[in-house]
């Protein structure tokens, strides 16, 4: 039987119990601290045991869980097990609209933000666990030591590109249209642009473009991979410990295109950075496509990464019309509707980044859905007050 540990915030316990019951009905054993702990038990020891024994760790992402130290620690343990066992183990699922940690980008296995999608999301989650079980389920000896079974793919150091991010649903506006065109050219091997450096602030589409490139290149038969800098660093440390750096290097050099997200983190990774720079220059020498994203300008990173031959795509925050287009696009994709004056209000007042803009739209749609009432001025004033109180405007890269 597959065993799954659910990592969550206690504030979300009602939803988590509902989720656990639905998963149990599919024949999967669930570890929940409110069920598995007994009076007198050690909380830390029992949670540690649950994490060690689980075949999968389901992480419920919500406003409360992403700030929970318990959840952060459980997620860290899960990611470290993934690296050690070289398999998919952590299954993030969305319960509320939150900013997804960069190292989990492209790894959301189910979306429970809408009650109408609950059954479909459960099916997707079960499929993710069931399809991996045949290859990745651990056998245990009498001593309890885990012995990984041999898997067809023993060295998977990248993640698949997120299929929801395409060029078709990337909204063009004056601050990004040239960058979009340059990234499209990277997909065509006959064109001169092989390498792209995408720079810009948080939440304005860097990762979207990187995933769009990978998805289009993969559709044409390319061997492509996506990797966040933190995952590359963890993989390097593991390869160094196991004396398998040549294997690690060969894996990346076998790709036709590689996207590395948030390369500014290489500024603090001495040995991993040197290793990446060596791979990067081999990509350049061989004409292999590589996409780098950063929230810092190339000038601040160049000295450390020795970047060369890169076409720089500098993304700017959307203007008012761009914000309108983004909001209407999200409405079309979701199949939802909302009054035009709400779109105008958001477009004219939320100018920080597209991610925050979309978050406020989802919040208003949820309020409309659950209250059964139309959005009014008081709702918009509440949004604006929260925005002024909580938002930090990142300076534009110029």
Image: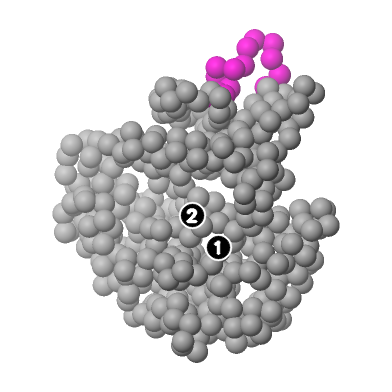
Decide: marks 1, 2 in contact (CB < 8 A)?
yes
Query: Which of these two is toward me, 58 or 250?
Result: 250
Residue at image coords 34%, 38%: 120
Name the residue located 41 percent from the left edge and 40 percent from the top edge.
Answer: 124
Quarter of the image holding residue 286? bottom right
Residue 37 is one of the magenta-drawn residues: yes
Q: Secondary structure at mark 1?
A: strand
Q: Is residue 299 left or right of residue 198?
A: right
Question: Looking at this view, is 376 or 113 the one in front?
Answer: 113
Badge number at residue 106:
2
Looking at the rendered structure, which numbered label has been put on residue 280?
none
Q: Is residue 393 among what the camera can see?
A: no
Percent x, y of residue 302: 67, 81
Q: Which mark sits nearer the N-terminus, 1 or 2? A: 2
- Expressed as whole percent of the image width and height from the top left, the position of residue 104 reads 54, 51
* Nearer the observer, 240 or 19: 240
Q: Which residue sits furthest top?
A: 39
Bounds of the magenta segment: 30-43
Q: Is residue 187 above or below residue 272?
A: below
| Residue under numbered circle 1 | 226
């Amino acid at each position: 039987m597959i065993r799954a540990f659910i990592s969550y915030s206690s504030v979300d316990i009602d939803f988590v119990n509902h989720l656990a019951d639905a998963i149990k009905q599919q024949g999967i054993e669930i570890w929940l601290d409110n069920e598995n702990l007994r009076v007198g038990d050690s909380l830390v020891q029992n949670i540690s045991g649950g994490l060690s024994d689980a075949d999968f760790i389901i992480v419920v992402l919500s406003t409360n869980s992403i700030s929970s130290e318990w959840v952060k620690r459980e997620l860290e343990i899960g990611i470290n097990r993934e690296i050690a066992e070289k398999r998919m183990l952590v299954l993030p699922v969305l319960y509320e609209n939150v900013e997804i940690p960069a190292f989990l980008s492209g790894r959301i296995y189910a979306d429970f933000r809408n009650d109408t999608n609950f059954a479909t999301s459960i099916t997707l989650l079960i499929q993710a666990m069931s399809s991996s079980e045949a290859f990745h389920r651990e056998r245990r000896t009498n001593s309890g030591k885990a012995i990984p079974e041999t898997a067809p793919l023993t060295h998977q150091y990248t993640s698949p590109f997120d299929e929801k991010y395409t060029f078709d649903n990337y909204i063009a506006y004056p601050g990004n249209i040239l960058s979009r065109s340059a990234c499209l050219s990277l997909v065509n091997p006959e064109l001169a642009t092989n390498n792209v450096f995408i720079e810009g602030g948080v939440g304005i589409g860097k990762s979207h473009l990187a995933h769009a490139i990978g998805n289009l290149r993969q559709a044409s038969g390319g061997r492509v991979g996506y990797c966040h800098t933190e995952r590359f660093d963890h993989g390097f440390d593991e390869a160094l410990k196991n004396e398998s750096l040549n294997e690690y290097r060969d894996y990346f050099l076998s790709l036709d295109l590689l996207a590395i997200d948030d390369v500014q983190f290489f500024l603090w990774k001495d040995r991993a950075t040197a290793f990446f720079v060596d791979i990067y220059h081999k990509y350049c020498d061989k004409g292999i496509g590589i996409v780098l994203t950063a929230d810092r300008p190339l000038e601040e990173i160049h000295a450390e990464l020795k970047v060369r031959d890169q076409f720089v795509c500098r993304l700017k925050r959307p203007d008012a019309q761009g914000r309108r287009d983004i909001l209407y696009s999200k409405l079309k994709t979701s199949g939802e509707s909302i009054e035009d004056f709400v779109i105008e209000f958001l477009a004219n007042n939320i100018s920080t980044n597209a991610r925050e803009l979309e978050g406020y739209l989802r919040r208003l749609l949820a309020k409309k859905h659950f209250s059964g009432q139309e959005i009014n001025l008081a709702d918009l004033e509440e949004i604006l007050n929260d925005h002024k109180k909580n938002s930090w405007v990142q300076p534009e890269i110029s």
